[in-house]
Amino acid sequence: MAVILLALALLVATASAVRGIWSPCGLSMLSSITPMTESGRGHRFGVTAAWFVVGGAVGGLCLGALAATGAAGLSAAGLSLDARMGIGAVVALLTAGIDLGVFGVELPIFKRQVDDAWLRRYRGWAYGAGFGWQIGFGVATYIMTAGIFLTIALAVLTASAAQALLVGAVFGVVRGSAVYVGRSASSPAALARVHERLDAVGPYARTTATGVQVVAAALLASTAWHPLAGLVVVAALVAAWSLARGASTQPARS
């Protein structure tokens, strides 16, 4: 069962990191760090992008280090695996509900962008690594999905500092690697095509990030409590989502 917990943590981390590409900050990075823009600044895209990934990895490791502290404390407390998976199921239920709009929380939250003045002030490796760290840390810029909080929670619930670091590192590397989405943008027209493709794929990324959290909630509940508990969790989320959607489409009374 411990393998299931770690696998779900890595899956949620990956889906949440990919979802972050569509944040205003993420899209800005894809427009600001391209072969075209780096050439205009006298820098090489490959070098800046590599430093961006390194920064993302370090940012993810910093996030993982915070989770590792909690994981070590949880290990010392001796909380059983069933109890940890049950807690994970509850957290996944809550974060999935946030992404589904059940609780009235509007995403994105923490609407902060990186400082684009760095592009004019520093060398490519410096702003590449600096921007990458902020992106890879996950909670320093726009948060597009509550899956980030589930990622942190599941990393802590592994009760293993090493596994928590791994989860953070995977999140950071995936998040940082998004800079290569714009590797074909060598002209304004090519950059426009990149963003057109992103616009087309965006809804699928949002649905996937939410769906992964629903799956995590169902699997954790089934494993921790009862095989049928997962079905109950999914049914509850679908019912709550339907009610919230219905309420949002109700015409306002005068």
Image (spheres, rainbow, N blue to C red):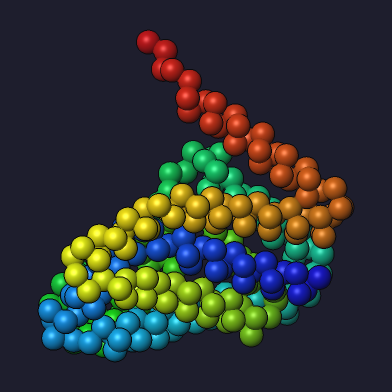
Identify which residue, 180 or 217, lies in the foreground. 180
Q: Residue 69: image x %, image y %?
A: 59, 79
**Residue 39: percent from the left, percent from the top?**
16, 82
**Quadrant location, the C terminus:** top left
Provide residue 242's location: percent of width, then percent of height: 60, 32
The residue positioned 25% from the left and 65% from the top of the image is 191
**Image height check: is 57 above or below 204?**
below
Total numbered labels placed on residues in the image: 0
- Up/down of 232 relative to 219, above or below: above
* Quadrant of image for the N terminus: bottom right
- Horizontal side, residue 152 vs residue 220: left or right: left
Q: Residue at x 55, y 43 (%)?
A: 100
24 over 182 or under it: above or below: above
The correct choice, above or below, for 99 with respect to 182 in the image is: above
> How far from the left and from the top, in percent, is residue 231?
78, 45
Q: Is residue 224 left or right of residue 252?
A: right
Q: Residue at x 48, y 74 (%)?
A: 174
In screen coordinates, is 124 left or right of 19? left
The picture quadrant where one finds residue 194 is: bottom left
Residue 192 image-quadrant placement: bottom left
Would you say residue 140 is visible in this rendering?
yes
Which residue is outermost to the top?
254
Question: Residue 208 lies in what quarter of the image?
Answer: bottom right
Q: Is residue 137 visible?
A: no
Q: Residue at x 49, y 56 (%)?
A: 205
